[in-house]
């Protein structure tokens, strides 16, 4: 089966999940091509070695990749972000038919919602179905992150989303809450498939800490609570800064922030203004370094804003955290908290409550090493037993095959 993966983001951007999907589908004897943009996320700056051109072909980790031009941007400006999204959508719709062979099915990665436009155009031109995987619910995500506040504009985005859902042959969602959301919007329940993201249990696994690296990064001799990932409005990491103020009397506790995003500079400034010495910012690190960084952590932290949308969201970082075999502190509500609680992999606390977050850190710190190790072992067991890559990709393949078979 020939499969086209349509996504605005792909490695070297932090979109390893899609690369793993492409490689796994290749391993199942499918012919896979990726249609994507020039890499610029999350900084909004083109990655070294790339220049905007009409097209670029390359092979990454054995997967053929076709890149089309876009407007590089990832600032807080809603207008500029929209130009980034729309520019890729138009390029993919106009150039895609000329740059890629006709597939049997198109696998579409959302966000952003605008990727639904080229998905529909290409499906019409080639007369093939498209399967739409939803990682974020729009327009709710736009409202929750403050990217779009106009009720009229949000209603328009909602109308476009419902149109895309109707045109898709099948929809993949990552949580039960996402499915309920779509059903409430009138989407036919039978076309929705709940398939959670997987944990890369080969890359992320329990490992001994690199003591030299710990010294280099200022993590030696500390109780390290590590957050890794995008740093934006949705993550609300100002809560972590406030929680750190409750813990200044304990010289061992340290929050380590790994990543980049629109809120990073504000976060650094807030820590400076409070005179905090128990926060360390490591910036964006290569994906290949992340397993080693996780190994230096005593606790892995996930935090999202207190918003109805995020109660039905399961951040992909939770899967990597589980696979790493470390205790997880999930300052979230809803489906994401359920994943951690059901696995017995750590503690949960309400989001955007600094005192609760600080207290949860204290509780984890006072546990014995054996108790924390047991949490990490249960995390790893959940990753292997419930969120393995092979089984999850097989389920995605099943949806793709059945979609092609039923397409008239």
Image (cartoon, grey):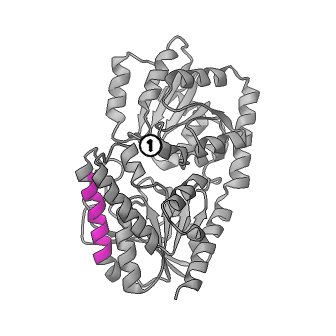
Where residue 386 sits: x, y (%)? 70, 54
Callout count: 1
Nearest the viewer among 365 and 203 is 365
Helix, strand or loop at label 1? It is loop
Q: Nearer the viewer, residue 189 or 293?
A: 189
Task: Tell me where residue 390 sits by quadrant.
Answer: bottom right
Q: Position of residue 81 (x, y in %)?
A: 28, 53
267 or 130: nearer the viewer:
130
Q: Position of residue 364 (x, y in %)?
A: 65, 25
Relative vertical location of residue 8 with respect to residue 404 in this rendering, above or below: above
Q: Residue at x 38, y 79 (%)?
A: 122
Residue visible at 56% across and 71% down in the picture: 191
- Is residue 91 magenta-colored? yes
When asked about the image quadrant of residue 161, the answer is bottom left
Judged by its main secondary structure, the magenta piece is helix
**Residue 15 seen by the camera:** yes
**Magenta part of the protein: which range?**
81-94
Q: Residue at x 39, y 54 (%)?
A: 139
* Magenta highlight on residue 220: no
Quadrant placement of the N terminus: bottom right
The answer to whether residue 223 is above or below residue 396 is above
Q: Residue furthest bottom?
A: 408
Residue 196, by quadrant, is bottom right
How far across and down, in percent of the image, does residue 331 sit? 55, 34
Q: Is residue 228 rendered to the left or right of residue 153?
A: right
Q: Which residue is mark 1?
A: 285
């Amino acid at each position: 089966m020939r499969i086209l993966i349509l996504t605005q983001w792909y490695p070297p951007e932090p979109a390893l999940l899609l690369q793993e999907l492409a490689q796994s589908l290749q391993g199942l004897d499918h012919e896979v091509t990726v249609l994507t943009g020039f890499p610029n996320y999350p900084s909004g700056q083109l990655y070294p070695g790339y220049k905007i051109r009409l097209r670029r072909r390359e092979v990454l980790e054995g997967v053929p990749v076709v890149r089309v031009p876009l407007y590089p941007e990832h600032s807080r400006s809603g207008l500029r972000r929209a130009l980034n999204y729309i520019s890729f959508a138009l390029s993919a719709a106009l150039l895609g038919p000329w740059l890629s062979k006709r597939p049997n099915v198109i696998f579409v990665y959302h966000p952003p919602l605008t990727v639904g436009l080229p998905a529909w155009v290409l499906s019409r031109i080639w007369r093939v179905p498209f399967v739409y995987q939803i990682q974020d619910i729009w327009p709710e995500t736009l409202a929750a992150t403050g990217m779009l506040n106009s009720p009229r504009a949000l209603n328009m985005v909602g109308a476009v989303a419902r149109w895309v859902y109707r045109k898709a042959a099948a929809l993949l969602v990552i949580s039960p809450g996402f499915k309920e959301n779509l059903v409430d919007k009138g989407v036919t329940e039978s076309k929705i498939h709940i398939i959670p993201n997987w944990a890369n249990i080969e890359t992320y696994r329990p490992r001994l800490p690199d003591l030299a690296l710990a010294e280099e990064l200022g993590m030696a001799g500390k109780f390290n609570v590590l957050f890794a990932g995008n740093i934006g409005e949705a993550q609300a990491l100002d809560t972590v800064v406030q929680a750190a103020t409750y813990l200044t009397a304990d010289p061992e506790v340290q929050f380590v922030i790994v990543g980049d995003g629109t809120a990073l500079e504000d976060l650094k400034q807030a820590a400076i203004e409070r005179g905090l010495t128990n926060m360390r910012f490591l910036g964006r690190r290569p994906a290949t370094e992340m397993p080693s960084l996780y190994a230096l952590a005593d606790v892995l932290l996930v935090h999202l804003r207190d918003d109805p949308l995020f109660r039905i969201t399961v951040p992909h970082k939770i899967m990597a955290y589980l696979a790493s075999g470390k205790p997880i502190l999930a300052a979230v509500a809803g489906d994401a908290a359920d994943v951690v609680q059901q696995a017995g992999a750590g503690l949960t606390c309400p989001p955007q409550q600094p005192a609760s977050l600080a207290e949860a850190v204290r509780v984890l710190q006072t546990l014995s090493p054996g108790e924390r190790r047991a949490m990490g072992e249960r995390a790893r067991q959940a990753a292997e037993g419930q969120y393995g890559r092979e089984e999850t990709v097989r389920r995605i393949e099943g949806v793709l095959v059945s979609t092609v078979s039923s397409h008239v």
